[in-house]
Image (spheres, coloured by chain):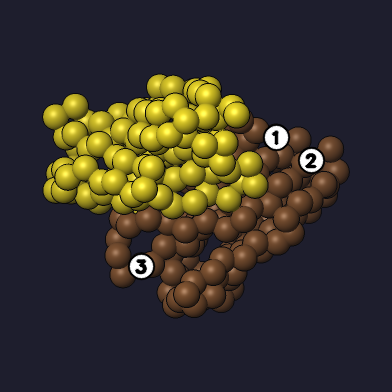
Amino acid sequence: SQTIHQWPATLVQPVGSPLSLECTVEGTSNPNLYWYRQAAGRGLQLLFYSVGIGQISSEVPQNLSASRPQDRQFILSSKKLLLSDSGFYLCAWRDDRVRHYEQYFGPGTRLTVT
Amino acid sequence: AQKVTQAQTEISVVEKEDVTLDCVYETRDTTYYLFWYKQPPSGELVFLIRRNSFDEQNEISGRYSWNFQKSTSSFNFTITASQVVDSAVYFCALSAQSLNNDMRFGAGTRLTVKP
């Protein structure tokens, strides 16, 4: 069966510091991968998605970036965090053979920028 | 427009009451998929159900049931005999060809079930 991991689970970082969140998927190959952000008490905002290694699509212009160095690894980064980057970051995957089907989510990373 | 509207921001019920969460969608696609997810306090989104646009049969899974009506562009979710463990935020979502790889989520409904 497939599993998706995210780490760290929680993170407290000062403004201006760098960020690296990691997401890995097991039990599948060539998944579509997604990064979402959820501000406190709000809905989900799609940040990036990837259909393959090195292929990243950005949905929202901001100071975040994403990379996919391996088939089942998706990384969210920032060079300098802003207060507004605080939130709950969720990684998700979908089987690329079944377009438009459900996405499966990881446990999330709660980021607080101070 | 491709849009999902969950008009109920928060709902509070007492245990054992039935509760219906509303979801209204907009899409220009003829083929599309609708979903419900549950987000408990732990934060992880849990997939509950997928429905495609050609299947209007209602679905029942234990205490959960879903009513899909294309005529009103709605995909409502009913929990029968609610329990405290049902307390969560519930998201309705839409996926369609014109959305490419995106899934459009509603804003979510926070359900609180009191003992």
* Separation of residues labelled 1 and 2 (CA atoms): 8 Å
Total of numbered circles in the picture?
A: 3
Q: Nearer the viewer, residue A79 or B39?
A: B39
Q: Nearer the viewer, residue B63 or A64?
A: B63
**Dot 1 or dot 3, earlier in sequence:** 1
Q: Which chain does the residue under circle 3 lie in? A: A
Horizontal and vertical percent position of residue A40 = 65, 33
Q: Residues within 10 Å of mark 1 (few under 14, many from 20)?
A: few
In depth, the one of B60 and A64 nearer the eye is: B60
Q: What residue is disc 1 on?
A: A84
Subunit under mark 2: A
Q: Find disc 3 in the rendering and name its residue.
A: A96
- In the shown orientation, is residue B4 left or right of residue A6? left
Secondary structure beneath disc 3? Answer: loop
Chain identifier of the brown chain: A
Amino acid type assigned to the residue bearing label 3 in the image: Asp
Mark 1 touching mark 2, by CB under 8 A? yes
**3D distance between C-alphas at marks 3 and 2:** 34 Å
In the image, what residue occupies the spot 44% across and 52% down? B47
Position of residue A46 measured from the top left corner of the image (x, y, whole percent):
50, 45
Look at mark 2 in the image and give the residue it sits on.
A113
Disc number placed over residue B37 in the picture, else none: none
- Provide the chain ID for the residue under circle 1: A
**What is the x, y in percent for residue B57?**
17, 45
Q: Report if the CB atoms under discs 1 and 3 are less than 8 Å apart.
A: no
In the image, what residue type sits under mark 2? Answer: Val
Q: Earlier in the sequence, mark 1 or mark 2?
A: 1
Q: Which chain is yellow?
A: B
